Image (cartoon, rainbow, N blue to C red):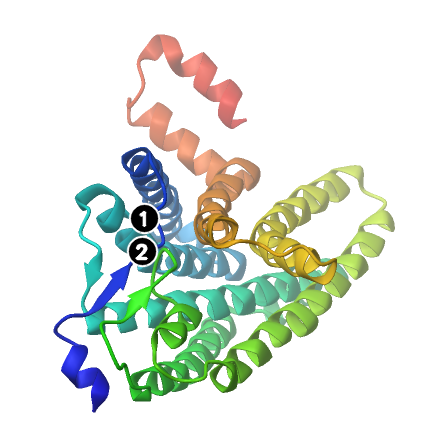
Amino acid sequence: MANENYSLHGFIITGFDHLQNQKLLGFLILITYMLILLGNGINLCIILTDRHLHKPMYILICNLAVIDIMFSSSCSTTMISVLLTEIKTISYYSCISSMFFYHLGDITVCMALTLMAIDRLIAIRLPLRYYSIVTNSRTCFLIFLTWLIGFTVIGFLASVVESVPYCHQPVIKYVFCDHPSLIRAACVDPEPYFFIPVMISLWMLCGQFPFIMCTYAVLAYSVTKLSNNSSKKQMISTCSSHLVVLFSYYAPKLVSILLTRIGVVLNLTERNAVLIVASLIPPLINPTVYCTRTKEIRKRLADVFLHKKIVPHHLKVISIALFS
């Protein structure tokens, strides 16, 4: 196989070559990545260690946190390595595995957001039957099903990438390993290989996204019918948190498509910028939103800070104000 001959040499990543302040960008990505790990790690620890939070909605938040860590790690580690160590070569199998987990995260986060939208829809439309319909076991099964779908689809994509030949030392003009960059680095006509990724993107943007928006339209209508102001405020707060997470994920994709549709051609630098934003900002926003907007997680976080004496006594008043 041609790719076996070049596996030892790996891929050369040149997406950052034109930048002057590579170290600065590398440190910014490193700090962002550390914040992603910290925020999602806090969410996971709080939910996993508090039995009162072992409920379907929090299981879904845990699932999203795991996906965010995997998704950001698959691309951040490569970018940090290239920018800070100036080692531009990544081994063949490291690149393939990075591509696999990057696209696995991309497809599973889409399905995770769909599950969260359905969960909120049932909670508001059928509140009395919610805990009989949405159980922990059913939630875990649906999460397992989304991961199984993701592994199957992306596993097939990875097998296609492994089968393409490389006629020379492959060069990736982008900032990390993903499916398009690996295909464009091969000595094949790339267009036929983009059919399946395009179908996946259409499924996410024209199938999943409109469905999620329809569920939230129904939720918005249902919230207006609530007579209890306290319940109405709680539902609005919960749904608004989910919408922030939803748009942080879909906004870069929609903007990129919109610019393309109106005839704006992005150069390589602009494409890489959109790719970095789409890969790092959603995993950074998600734990922040759930820590600050979800009452139970916020309360648990406040308890940790105040009761474990992590902050000095004279700062407790400020902490209570922030977390309440």
Element at label 1: loop
Report crowding for label 1: few under 14, some 14 to 19, many 20 or more residues within 10 A (C-alpha).
some
Question: Image point 73% across, 67% down: which residue?
Answer: 210
On the question of residue 324 being in view, the answer is yes
Question: Image point 71% across, 69% down: which residue?
Answer: 211
Q: Are marks 1 and 2 in contact (CB under 8 Å)?
A: yes
On the question of residue 128 being in view, the answer is no
Residue labelled with disc 2:
14
Outermost residue toward the bottom in this view = 1
Residue labelled with disc 1:
17
Amino acid beneath label 2: Thr
Q: Position of residue 249 (x, y in %)?
A: 56, 54
* Left or right relative to 14: residue 154: right
Amino acid beneath label 1: Asp
Q: Position of residue 195 (x, y in %)?
A: 55, 83
In the image, 61 versus 4, the foreground residue is 4
Total numbered badges shown on the rendered structure: 2
